[in-house]
């Protein structure tokens, strides 16, 4: 999987490089011109891949399975945040991670995920500060772990609920 998606100029929604609209899914959606996307990657070098020139399209592996001792990173991307009269954006995140038994691992609300002066084209794909790192530890229950992140564009007044999951494999 690679970031070959761009924001559509008229709607602010996700489209492929050849201009075809990408339908909303649990992990990627656009609402009211604002877009969000969650990616689950096993890439330990994801930061290096992301921190390249704007002309370089990062390529992230995706994984839905992790073994004990292995690591996954959940990345939250966004596009087309609305800016206020001062040219600033304000994006908050609610982050919830649920264990296979239904109990919460994390439940944080109103975390500042992006703020300040918007640099560049608002339709550029941006990485939020909501980066979740997971490692399968001995006390963790095996099974399906669910990650939910709600991106809130405070200036636009729009919330995008996103959801992904991964499986911690039995020993």
Image (spheres, helix red, strand yellow):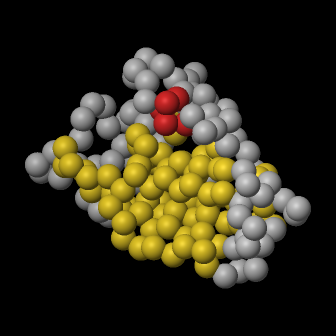
Residue ID at (43%, 30%): 51
Work out whether residue 133 or residue 146 is closer to the camera in this orientation and state it: 133
Residue 68 is at least partly visible in this image: yes
Q: Nearer the viewer, residue 101 or 14?
A: 101
The answer to which quarter of the image holds residue 7 is top left
Name the residue at 36% across, 66% down: 111
The quarter of the rendered structure image containing the N terminus is: top right
Q: Is residue 168 left or right of residue 157?
A: right
Q: Residue furthest left?
A: 86
Give percent across and percent down for residue 132: 53, 56
Residue 59 in percent (x, y) is at: 60, 28
Q: Is residue 115 left or right of residue 80?
A: left
**Front residue of 155 and 137:** 137
Work out whether residue 167 can be spotted: no
In this view, the residue farthest toward the right is 171
Q: How many marks?
A: 0
For the C terminus, the image quarter is bottom right
In the image, residue 36 above or below residue 3: below
In percent of the image, x 45 and y 68: which residue is there?
94
Viewer-side residue, 124 vs 130? 130
Residue 77 at x, y percent in the picture: 47, 46
Residue 146 location, x and y as percent? Answer: 67, 66
Q: Is residue 90 left or right of residue 159?
A: left
């Amino acid at each position: 999987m690679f970031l070959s998606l761009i924001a559509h100029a008229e709607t602010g929604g996700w489209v492929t490089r050849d201009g075809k609209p990408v339908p909303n899914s649990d992990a990627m959606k656009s609402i009211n011109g604002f877009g969000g996307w969650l990616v689950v990657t096993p890439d330990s070098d994801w930061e290096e891949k992301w921190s390249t020139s704007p002309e370089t399209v990062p390529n992230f592996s995706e994984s839905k399975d992790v073994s004990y001792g292995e690591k996954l990173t959940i990345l939250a991307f966004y596009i087309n945040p609305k800016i206020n009269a001062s040219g600033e954006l304000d994006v908050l995140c609610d982050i919830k991670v649920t264990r296979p038994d239904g109990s919460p691992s994390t439940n944080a609300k109103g975390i500042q995920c992006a703020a300040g002066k918007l640099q560049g084209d608002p339709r550029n794909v941006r990485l939020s500060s909501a980066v979740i790192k997971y490692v399968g530890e001995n006390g963790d229950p095996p099974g399906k772990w669910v990650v939910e992140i709600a991106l809130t564009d405070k200036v636009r007044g729009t919330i995008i609920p996103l959801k992904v999951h991964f499986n911690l494999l039995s020993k």
